[in-house]
Structures are given as C-alpha cells and as structure tokens.
C-alpha cells in the first residue's frame, strides 16, 4: 500500500444528469448526478475502476487523481428544470468534499427544485449536511444508505478493512447511521459488494443486519461483486499480494471474459439476508421516496408494492413468466402520465385494463391500488 499524493483536477463537463427511462426497483432512482470522478476511498473492489466508468489508463490512479466537476450545481439546476419529478442519486462525501463542497451545493439545488434524493455513502462526512438533508426530506424525501460489508464482529473484519483501508471504519459509518435515523431520515445498509470468501458467511450477513437494526437502520440491501477488464486484473493483483489463499477462488468465480461471479449461489445469500433482517425487525427492501402531494403518488406506491411482490417471488424462485408479468405491470404503471387513482375512479377495472402492457395484471393492480389508498387515508 504505497501512499500517493492526491491530485485534484477541476474541469467543466457539458452535462451532469444521467437519466434512465424510469426509476429502478432497487434504489428507486431515475437520475444520477455525481460531483467527482475518482474516489479517495479507493476501495480495491470498486467497479468504477472498470474501463467504462474510469477515465484513467492506470486503475491505481482512481483513488488519488480526482476530477472535480466545478460547474456541477449549475448544470444540475439547468437539467432539473425540464426533468420529470423523480429521485436523484447524488452527493459524494469523499475527503475532496471538504475542500470543494460540490455535494452540498448540489443538494441545495435538489432542495430548491423539490426533487427526492438518495445518497449512498462510505463516509460519515455526510453528517455535515444533515440540516440540508432534513430540509429536503421535509419537502421531497431523502433516503440514505451506508456502504458497509462487514462489522467488527465478523471473522474476516481485518482482511475486509484492508480492502477499503482509505475509507472511515465501518463502526464510524454505523454511528453516522444512528444520527441520520435520529433525524427521522430513512437510512440503512447497502452490503455492496458481498466479497466471496470474506463477507458471504451467514454470521457476517447476520451481524451486518443486527448492527444496522441496532443503529436505527431500517433496511439491508445486498449485491455481489462484479469484476471486468482492467479492474479484474487489478483486483487479482491485490489478492495475490494480500490474500493469496483466496486467489484460486476468485479465479474460478471470475473466469476470463466473465463479469461473474459464475456459480455463486446469490439466491441463498438473499434468503439469508431476508432471514437476518426479519429476525432484527428490518427489511431487505428500501422504501421508495415519494414527494408528498405529487400527482402520481398512488402510481408510485402501486409500483413499489408490485416491486416488493416481485422481490418476494424471486426469493421463492417462482417461474420466469410470473416474474415478467409483475415486472412489466410495474413498468406500465410507472410509465403512466395520469393519476392511476383518478383513472380507476372514473373507469373502474376497465380503465386499468386499458393501461398499455398491463395484460392480465389489472386485477392485481386494482388490489394494490386499494391497499395504497387505505394507507393514504390512515
Ligand atoms: S466508496 Fe464507493 S465509489 Fe468510492 S471507492 Fe469505495 S466503492 Fe468505489
């Protein structure tokens, strides 16, 4: 681990807001806007070292050559003027933020525009902006997730810490989680990525869920490690140097040309996380941030309920055609421009059946709509 001098390169990109066709069913974000390229937390496993994300020839530069998008707040303000209301994945509290303050300024733009925000963070530095997050949450909703893949209780804690040695320790992230929860903002953990042989043992999955619940978190999401092109070689090099006993496992899970992990039973891990979350009274799904009073409140809640059921069915390994029916119904409701509640009030089930691509799911949607209405009236 040779220390590097950090270099900051300010520049002015032409655009800042990445837009998807619709919100995903995971973080519930449709947009993303990041203030920096490169990350001083320098996690060895970070997928951002892959060629398609990284502007660096040498993946090692990723952690100490930081490009600062100095016009990010202005670009964001302009882009949000014509963007339909939906959640934005933004802010980044790596140490550069203390010098440049771009995340704070971007959050100020989100507040001004009334857009919901999702922040995924490895740094308790986010607490500096708790006042602002509270204000956005009051107006438009905020969700925060801390990237945490291990706890001090875990048997591989020291080895995992080596993989993210430039980031503040997991304990500090949990303490920050507690403060965010106390401020009334939904917060939880993203176990991303679950490193094979280091983080995927049931005791670690249980410990992360328990620590999350004990610190006011309300959810744990998890996903596996992907490795491709220059990042795969880089990470194999890290293993060769620091954990050579794991190299053969990773070479088997991540053969040439695969993104991986090939042959890893992630379904089993998802079930174990579900079990641990249930035991500690939290969820393995993130709540959708929905702006109070917006026209499509019911649509968004119905989509959330459909996606929750889809997740349930995936855990139960239900057949693909059933999963696709729910997925397509969720997309169909998400894509509607009119209020699904009004449509149902004026046309009943026939109105729902007329939604493009809803197929035979209209009666399921009708049931979920009744549930969403009931919640709203409580
Ligand atoms: S904190 Fe996130 S973005 Fe930064 S290096 Fe680690 S995994 Fe990558």
Image (cartoon, rainbow, N blue to C red):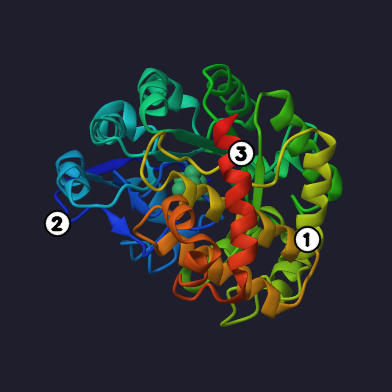
Residue 117 drawn at (x, y percent): 40, 39
Check if mark 2's residue and mark 3's residue have beta carbons within 8 Å: no
- Check disc 1 and report its element: helix, strand or loop: helix
Residue at 15% from the left image edge and 43% from the top image edge: 71
First in residue order: circle 2 vs circle 3: 2
Could you give the CA–CA distance between mark 2 and mark 3, rounded to whole angstroms? Answer: 45 Å
User: 267 or 65, which is in the foreground?
Assistant: 267
Q: Decide: is 114 above or below 353.
A: above
Mark 1 close to ligand 1, CB under 8 Å: no
Check if mark 1's residue and mark 3's residue have beta carbons within 8 Å: no
Residue at 82% from the left image edge and 42% from the top image edge: 276
User: 215 or 287, which is in the foreground?
Assistant: 287
User: In this rendering, does residue 15 appear at all?
Assistant: yes
| Residue at which label 1 appears | 245
| Residue at which label 3 appears | 374
Could you give the CA–CA distance between mark 1 and mark 3, rounded to whole angstroms? Answer: 55 Å
Is 290 placed left or right of 216 in the picture? left
Residue 27 drawn at (x, y percent): 51, 49
First in residue order: circle 1 vs circle 3: 1
First in residue order: circle 2 vs circle 1: 2
User: 205 or 118, which is in the foreground?
Assistant: 118
Q: Nearer the viewer, mark 1 or mark 3?
A: 3
Residue 200 drawn at (x, y percent): 77, 53
Instruction: Rate crowding at label 3 as few (under 14), some (14 to 19) or many (20 or more) other CA atoms within 10 Å.
Output: few
- Check disc 2 and report its element: helix, strand or loop: loop
Residue at 67% from the left image edge and 70% from the top image edge: 261
Is 21 placed left or right of 277 in the picture? left
Q: Nearer the viewer, mark 2 or mark 1?
A: 2
- Check disc 3 and report its element: helix, strand or loop: helix
Instruction: Rate crowding at label 2 as few (under 14), some (14 to 19) or many (20 or more) other CA atoms within 10 Å.
Output: few
Q: Quadrant of residue 179?
A: top right
| Residue at which label 2 appears | 14
């Amino acid at each position: 681990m040779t220390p590097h001098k950090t270099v900051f390169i300010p520049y002015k990109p032409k655009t800042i807001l990445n837009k998807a066709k619709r919100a995903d069913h995971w973080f519930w974000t449709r947009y993303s806007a990041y203030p920096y390229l490169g990350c001083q937390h320098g996690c060895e496993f970070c997928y951002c070292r892959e060629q398609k994300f990284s502007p660096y020839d040498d993946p090692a530069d990723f952690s100490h050559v930081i490009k600062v998008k100095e016009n990010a707040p202005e670009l964001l303000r302009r882009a949000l003027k014509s963007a339909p209301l939906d959640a934005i994945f933004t802010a980044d509290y790596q140490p550069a933020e203390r010098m440049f303050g771009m995340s704070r300024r971007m959050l100020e733009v989100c507040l001004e525009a009334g857009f919901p925000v999702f922040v995924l963070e490895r740094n308790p530095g986010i607490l500096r902006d708790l006042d602002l997050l509270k204000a956005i949450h009051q107006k438009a909703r905020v969700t925060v997730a801390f990237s945490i893949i291990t706890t001090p209780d875990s048997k591989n804690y020291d080895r995992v810490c080596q993989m993210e040695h430039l980031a503040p320790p997991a304990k500090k992230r949990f303490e920050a989680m507690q403060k965010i929860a106390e401020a009334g903002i939904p917060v939880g953990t993203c176990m991303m990525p679950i490193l094979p042989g280091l983080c995927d043992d049931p005791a670690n999955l249980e410990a992360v869920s328990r620590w999350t619940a004990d610190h006011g978190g309300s959810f744990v999401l998890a996903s596996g490690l992907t490795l491709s092109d220059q990042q795969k070689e880089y990470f194999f090099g890290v293993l060769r140097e620091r954990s050579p006993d794991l190299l053969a496992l990773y070479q088997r899970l991540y053969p040439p040309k695969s993104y991986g992990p090939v042959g890893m039973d992630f379904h089993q891990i998802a079930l174990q996380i579900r079990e641990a979350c249930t035991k500690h009274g939290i969820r393995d799904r993130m709540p959708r941030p929905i702006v109070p009073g917006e026209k499509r409140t019911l649509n968004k809640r119905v989509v959330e309920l459909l996606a929750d059921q889809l997740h349930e069915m995936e855990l139960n390994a239900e057949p693909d055609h059933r999963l696709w029916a729910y997925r397509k119904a969720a997309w169909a409701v998400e894509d509607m421009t009119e209020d699904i509640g009004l449509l149902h009030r004026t046309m009943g089930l026939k109105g729902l059946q007329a939604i493009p691509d809803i197929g035979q799911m209209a009666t399921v949607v009708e049931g979920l709509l009744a549930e969403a209405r009931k919640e709203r009236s409580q």
